């Protein structure tokens, strides 16, 4: 076996010295694979939707969808399952960038019952809050619009238990994930046949890692919500996390203890549940550098995973993923 | 090798380097306890892809569950699935990720033992390379053979045999060489183009990422070195352009593009392209991407192609270069891996997904099944879960494909159950289709056999000939689609009728619409179509009629078979000779549906000893009819 490494290049410079096209880089391979998956779902399902959490994985997934249908727009709406407790800058990003600037349709679904009952992470605890606001809401939203396929930004490297996850994950009419009845996936041939009422979750980013995502954001200059980048922000300790004092719903006795720190957020969602990381990384390369230096798995900063008994499988069976 | 986790002094240089990495997908296979989990854990750990919190957990777990007496057990890094296995959750493949400065790696890890064939095939389908583990103490086992066979069946080009637990074999060179020789002897029977051997000790990490101090006799590369440097660029097929159309992008009236992933080959602006199966052609107007138009695109890019002309193209069609087309057929032979508890039932309706289309299909025959352990062939009626067999597949409409060894994407398909919608099988198309002539001969045989039991008519052939004042005969017109068989056949029928002959013209296209309306264009059905035509002609002969039959009948063997059914003395073979180009043009003008299939069968074999050759591109229909009429007179068919 020769030990010549492959010369790889971007499609921008598609030929090597011999005039042969050079192989795609890993990011371009991942990109092509994701585009293939997104197109396949849209071609085979009647009413797809893209779950859009406004986080970085969602933004990468949306970027890929825009590539897949260029020069047209993605032929499906986005769906944000809102709780009313996201960071303010996420709402701004959604309204000003996604809707106004990109001109995309973004449906927002909120569990009104939960909101009307005043379910709050500060008073009900993160577990109850998440269960009511998130788990129920996604199902209700999918039922309301009769979506038969929903794109999700999940990756297999996120959690040990996700390593075996298929690209197409099947759900019965009750949104149940039957672990014993998932289909083998070979080559790039995805089986999209469902019975009436059944649906799939499709994960175009399955083979991307945290590092790939950040490198791609850098390479493609993908716009993200600013709180991914470090800045001085008022923060306070809540349920073992350092959380942002993002609006005036933070209980006064907590808000009074707030201090101003250099922080950034590694995963976004509801601000009372998102742990801040002390950081000075204000650009994508700085974030990557920081990430490489301190390799800690990403979900650690998400309060929801720390709840006892709430394993990934459990949540998936309930329709979270 | 430098990996994430090291101190990075210049992040921009790091990013520039990492943005130019290639990607390698590989599969790890081994029997239980050969050390697969340990090896994968080692690769992740030594390439520093393990997160701090995971490592902390593993260190705790090493004390609690480890098999290593409390020291670090790399296997625990990947064993998140053990509990799920116990709960009976289906895990066919678990994917792991790590990267170095040179490459990003995707490991397909296939647990499970009973389901091994199915899982391995699934994991292997996308891999460039496979690592087969052998326990140095046990050597080549039955499972090793099975794994190697599946690796070669799924077309993986690079195989590394890792001889593990060398520490338990005293790091013995002799033992390693024994295993190597034993493996090579067996592997010579398989198609494994690139084979490497590495002696390792996964638990201590020797020769995995770091060189072993205990095996100075081994001068070859470490496993990581092989993974990082195996050249996969040359595995790409940049010649045969295949573009299965996945989606038609049509944002407004000004843009109509065909989106898909290039399965193989290269395409340039201005190239002439042919749409399959319609065979319409046009030129590439642009190769559109979100990041701007390209002059050239190649596999596995996923661009959107626009064409100069308004040709009909939809999802499931394939764009190719006209001078380099794949096969287009309604049937093929394939190696099929069965993946479901419900056994494969030949003759039952399934769906087949291949390229970007899903087509109703059936497996008409299981030729044999493979014993994956011995590689022997066995007779089989169906296929059970985890069995592999060679089958004949018949489809409801023609599809474009290549043999799997030539093209892993256009040669692969999955079988889907119509009721449960489960994926129940995975197939790899073989190089050749069923032999149409062999089919026909076997059917002909059946036709002849039945003659013995026939009742005799009370009217003899001579009595009929006397009444009609001519003899029966079959005038068989053969030639390319568009060579003018049908116009001549009908003109000849008119002429004979006017001369007082009891005559009937049996036309290939008409037969397809009635007599053979239930048949497809698969090889077996083409044979059946001819058999029916021959039997019908024979029956009309028995009634005393002269039959003028116009059939493409491309193969010389097929025509011989027809002649035998009809009877040699009554068969008159007329060859409508016409240049292929002219014939094709005529066929397109006449809108012949056969135009789409004209080269799907075996190429047209011109008769070597026809009773008459008509130059149909030069002579008029009247001239041709005259020539045939003269021949029939000479033969004494007509007075
Ligand atoms: N001595 C020694 N033991 C090993 C080596 N590799 C794996 N093992 C041990 O072999 C056993 C099976 O390994 P494991 O990785 O769980 O095997 P798997 O079933 O193939 O995943 C464990 O007890 C490992 O610690 C090695 O190189 N040397």
Image (tube, rainbow, N blue to C red):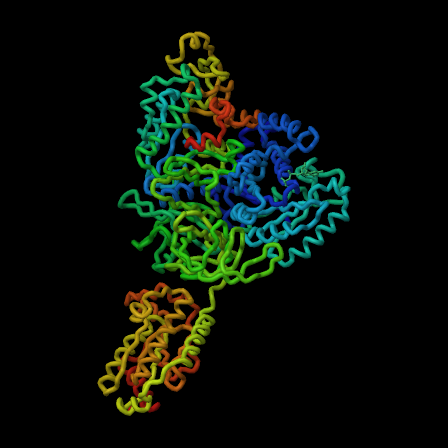
| In this view, A23 is above or below B370 | above
Q: Which one is in front, B432 or A222? A: B432
Image quarter in which the N terminus of chain B is found = top right
Q: Is residue B264 visible?
A: no
Write down the quadrant of residue B375 in the picture: bottom right
Residue at point 43%, 73% (across, down): B443
Toward the viewer: B607 or B368? Answer: B368
* Left or right of B251, for residue B218: right
Looking at the picture, does residue A7 appear above or below residue B459? Answer: above
Nearest to the observer: residue A202 or residue B566? B566
Q: Quadrant of residue A268?
A: top left
Residue B158 in percent (x, y) is at 60, 50
Taking the spot 33% from the left edge, 53% from the top edge, the residue there is B313
Residue sitting farthest toward the left: B498
Name the one closer to the observer, B388 or B277: B388
* In the image, residue B159 above or below residue B20: below
Can residue B165 be seen in this snapshot? yes
**Mark count:** 0
Q: Is residue B230 left or right of residue B635?
A: right
Residue B228 picture location, percent across and down = 61, 42
Determine which quarter of the picture holds residue A122: top left
Picture quadrant of ligand 1 = top right
The percent position of residue A301, horizontal first and vertical second, equals 50, 23
Locate the C terminus of chain B and report the quarter of the image it occupies.
bottom left
User: Percent from the top left, x then y, of residue A26?
Assistant: 51, 40
- Residue drawn at x 36%, y 48% as measured from the top left: B258
């Amino acid at each position: 076996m020769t030990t010549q490494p492959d010369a790889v290049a971007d499609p921008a410079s598609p030929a090597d010295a011999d005039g042969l096209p050079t192989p795609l880089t890993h990011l371009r391979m991942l990109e092509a694979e994701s585009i293939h998956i997104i197109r396949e779902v849209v071609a085979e399902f009647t009413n797809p939707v893209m779950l859009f959490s406004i986080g970085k994985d969602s933004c990468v997934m949306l970027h890929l969808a825009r590539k897949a249908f260029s020069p047209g727009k993605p032929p499906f709406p986005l769906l944000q399952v809102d709780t009313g407790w996201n960071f303010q800058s996420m709402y701004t990003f959604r309204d000003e960038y996604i809707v106004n600037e990109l001109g995309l349709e973004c449906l927002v679904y909120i569990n009104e019952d939960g909101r009307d009952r005043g379910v709050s992470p500060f008073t009900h605890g993160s577990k109850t809050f998440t269960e009511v606001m998130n788990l129920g809401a996604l199902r209700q939203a999918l039922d309301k619009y009769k979506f038969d396929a929903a794109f999700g930004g999940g990756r297999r490297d996120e959690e040990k238990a996700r390593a075996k996850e298929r690209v197409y994950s099947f759900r019965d009419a009750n949104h149940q994930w039957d672990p014993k009845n998932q289909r083998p996936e070979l080559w790039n041939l995805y089986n999209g046949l469902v019975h009436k009422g059944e649906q799939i979750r499709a994960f175009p980013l399955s083979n991307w890692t945290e590092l790939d995502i950040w490198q791609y954001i850098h390479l493609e200059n993908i716009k993200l919500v600013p709180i991914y980048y470090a800045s001085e922000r008022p923060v306070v300790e809540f349920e073992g996390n350092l959380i942002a004092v993002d609006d005036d719903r933070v209980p006064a006795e907590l808000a009074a203890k707030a201090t101003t720190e250099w922080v950034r957020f590694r995963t976004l969602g509801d601000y009372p549940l998102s742990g801040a990381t002390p950081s000075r990384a204000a650009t994508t390369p700085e974030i990557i550098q920081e990430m490489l230096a301190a390799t800690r798995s990403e979900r650690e900063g998400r309060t929801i995973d720390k709840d006892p008994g709430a394993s990934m499988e459990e949540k998936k069976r309930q329709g979270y993923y | 090798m430098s990996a994430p986790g090291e101190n990075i002094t210049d992040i921009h240089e790091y990013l520039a380097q990492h943005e130019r990495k290639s990607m390698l997908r590989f599969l790890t296979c081994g029997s239980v306890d050969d050390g697969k989990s340990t090896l994968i854990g080692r690769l992740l750990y030594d390439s520093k892809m393990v997160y701090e919190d995971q490592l902390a957990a593993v260190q705790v777990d090493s004390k609690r569950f480890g098999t290593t007496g409390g020291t670090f057990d790399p296997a625990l890094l990947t064993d998140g699935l053990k509990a799920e296995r116990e709960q009976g959750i289906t895990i066919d493949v678990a994917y792991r990720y790590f990267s170095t400065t040179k490459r990003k790696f995707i490991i397909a890890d296939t647990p499970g033992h009973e389901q091994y064939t199915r899982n391995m095939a699934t994991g292997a389908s996308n891999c460039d390379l496979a690592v087969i583990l052998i326990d140095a103490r046990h050597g080549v086992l039955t499972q090793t053979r099975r794994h190697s066979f599946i690796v070669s069946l799924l077309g993986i080009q690079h195989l590394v045999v890792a001889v593990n637990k060398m520490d338990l074999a005293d790091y013995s060179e002799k033992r390693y060489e024994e295993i190597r020789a034993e493996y090579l002897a067996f592997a010579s029977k398989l198609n494994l183009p690139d084979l490497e051997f590495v002696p390792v000790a996964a638990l201590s990490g020797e020769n995995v990422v770091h060189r072993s101090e205990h095996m100075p006799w081994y001068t070859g590369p470490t496993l990581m070195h092989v993974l990082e440097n195996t050249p996969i660029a040359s595995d790409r097929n940049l010649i045969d352009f295949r573009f299965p159309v996945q989606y038609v992008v049509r944002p407004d009236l000004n843009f109509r593009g065909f989106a898909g992933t290039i399965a193989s080959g290269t395409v340039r602006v201005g190239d002439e392209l042919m749409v399959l199966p319609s065979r319409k052609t046009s030129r590439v107007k642009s190769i559109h991407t979100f990041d701007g138009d390209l002059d050239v695109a190649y596999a596995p890019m996923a661009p959107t192609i626009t064409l100069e002309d308004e040709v009909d193209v939809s999802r499931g069609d394939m764009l190719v270069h006209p001078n380099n087309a794949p096969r287009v057929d309604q049937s093929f032979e394939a190696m099929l891996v069965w993946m479901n508890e419900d056994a494969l039932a030949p003759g039952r309706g399934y769906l087949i997904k291949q390229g970007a289309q899903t087509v109703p299909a059936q497996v008409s025959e299981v030729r044999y099944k493979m014993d994956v352990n011995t590689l022997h062939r066995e007779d089989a009626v169906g296929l059970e879960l985890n069995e592999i067999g060679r089958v004949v597949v018949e489809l409801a409409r023609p599809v474009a494909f290549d043999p799997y060894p030539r093209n892993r994407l256009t040669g692969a398909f999955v079988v889907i159950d119509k009721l449960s919608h489960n994926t129940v099988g995975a197939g790899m198309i073989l190089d050749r289709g069923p032999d149409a002539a062999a089919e026909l001969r076997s059917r002909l045989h059946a036709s002849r056999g039945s003659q013995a039991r026939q009742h005799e008519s009370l009217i003899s052939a001579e009595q009929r000939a006397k009444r009609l004042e001519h003899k029966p005969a079959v005038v068989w017109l053969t030639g390319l689609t568009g060579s003018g068989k049908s116009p001549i056949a009908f003109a000849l029928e008119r002429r004979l009728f006017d001369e007082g002959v009891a005559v009937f013209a049996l036309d290939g296209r008409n037969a397809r619409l009635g007599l053979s309306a239930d048949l497809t264009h698969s090889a077996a059905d083409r044979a059946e179509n001819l058999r029916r035509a021959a039997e019908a002609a024979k029956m009309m002969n028995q009634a005393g009629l002269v039959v003028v039959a116009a059939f493409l009948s491309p193969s010389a063997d097929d025509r011989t078979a027809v002649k035998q059914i009809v009877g040699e003395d009554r068969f008159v073979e007329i060859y409508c000779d016409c240049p292929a180009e002219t014939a094709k043009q005529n066929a397109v003008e006449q809108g012949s549906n056969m135009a789409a299939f004209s080269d799907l069968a075996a190429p047209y074999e011109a008769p070597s000893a026809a009773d008459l050759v008509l130059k149909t591109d030069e002579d008029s229909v009247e001239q041709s009819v005259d020539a045939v009429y003269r021949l029939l007179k000479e033969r004494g068919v007509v007075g």
